[in-house]
Amino acid sequence: MAAKVELTTRELKPGFGAEILGVDLAQADAETLKAVTEVFQNSGAILLRGQKMGPGDLMAFINQFGEPEGHTLGEYTLPGYPKIYVLSNRIVDGRPIGAHNDGVVWHTDYSYRQEPVMCTMLYAVEVPPVGSDTLLADIVAAYNALPEARREALDDLVVHHSFQYFMESRVYGKAETSPELFAQNPDVFHPLIRRHPQDGRKALWVSTGTVKGIVGMPEPEGAQLVDELVAFATQDEFVFRHRWEVGDVLMWDNRCTLHTGTLFDDTKYIRQMHRLWVKGDRPLAANGQPVFAPAA
């Protein structure tokens, strides 16, 4: 039996995340990659700097965590690699090669799906010298910081998520989307407090953009509560700010984090990232059970 690989790590912020040092992902053996996945499962996010990874390397690495997830909008996937999505403001032959300013609002990926993605990975191909930071919020720490009575009041709440609302919302503005795409992505209902399947830790699983309301709560009270909880969960004490360098691999667990991009001067600088997802499962509520759509 191969000896267990001991990785050198340091926290991204106190109590959250891990930067893994001294690992070349493109050349790493199976035991090292297994150790990397174990660090991820226990930390909420991992960072590895100085990587040199082609599309095949990225696919090989993401497969260590589960089955790669596709993308609702396939226009900007990398040619020949439909599971790699390009984020960029670069224009080639008069056409953008990627999505620009995608996800510049606090959210968790694919929350409008019955089974949201488990994790998100970004690989930095080209980054501006200033701006374009990615922020991660530790929503387990945010939940634990709430008073006990407040946690108990939130534990049973159910949130209405909607792809159609997401595409037409006040956050993202109007978007041209086909009725067929809306039909493929019907509204879903998820717990406000999500229990992590790995170890049972609870997260304040709020989001913006996809959230249409809270079941059983009139508007605007539901939207106001969501805004209040997002503001609480994204206070500086819960947030890690990642400043990008070329070759960075940053991966986060969507079951216990929120994230947002930030803007940069796109008239002066180019940014290009490759984004990959891993399929997830149905969110579990605070009681360890999935939630279902309310009776009509």
Image: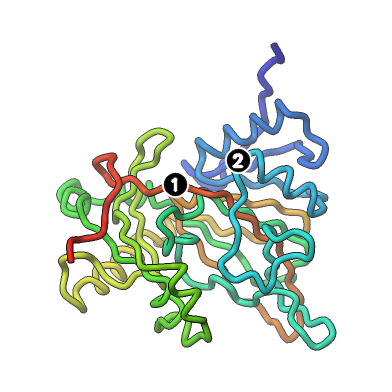
- Identify the residue at horizontal 45%, vertical 58% (top origin): 258
Mark-to-mark CA distance, 2 and 1: 13 Å
Considering depth in this image, is 226 or 278 the residue closer to the camera? 278
Rendered position, 246 above or below 252: below
Mark 2 belongs to which amino acid? Phe
- Which label is found at residue 281? 1
- Relative to 148, 42 lies left or right: right
Q: Which of the 4 image quadrants contains residue 74?
A: bottom right
Considering depth in this image, is 253 or 136 the residue closer to the camera? 253
Mark 1 belongs to which amino acid? Asp
Residue with the most extreme top position: 1
- Mark toward the start of the polypeptide (2 vs 1): 2
Rendered position, 271 above or below 140: below
- Identify the residue at horizontal 25%, vertical 59% (top origin): 293
Q: Which of the 4 image quadrants contains residue 263?
A: bottom right
- Relative to 273, 145 lies left or right: left
Across and down, in percent, residue 3 comes to: 69, 15
Q: Quadrant of the N terminus?
A: top right
Across and down, in percent, residue 160 comes to: 30, 66
- Identify the residue at horizontal 65%, vertical 77% (top origin): 100
Considering depth in this image, is 248 or 217 the residue closer to the camera? 217
- Which label is found at residue 65? 2
- Relative to 168, 160 lies left or right: left
Considering depth in this image, is 290 or 144 the residue closer to the camera? 290
- Identify the residue at horizontal 25%, vertical 51% (top origin): 146
Rendered position, 172 above or below 201: below
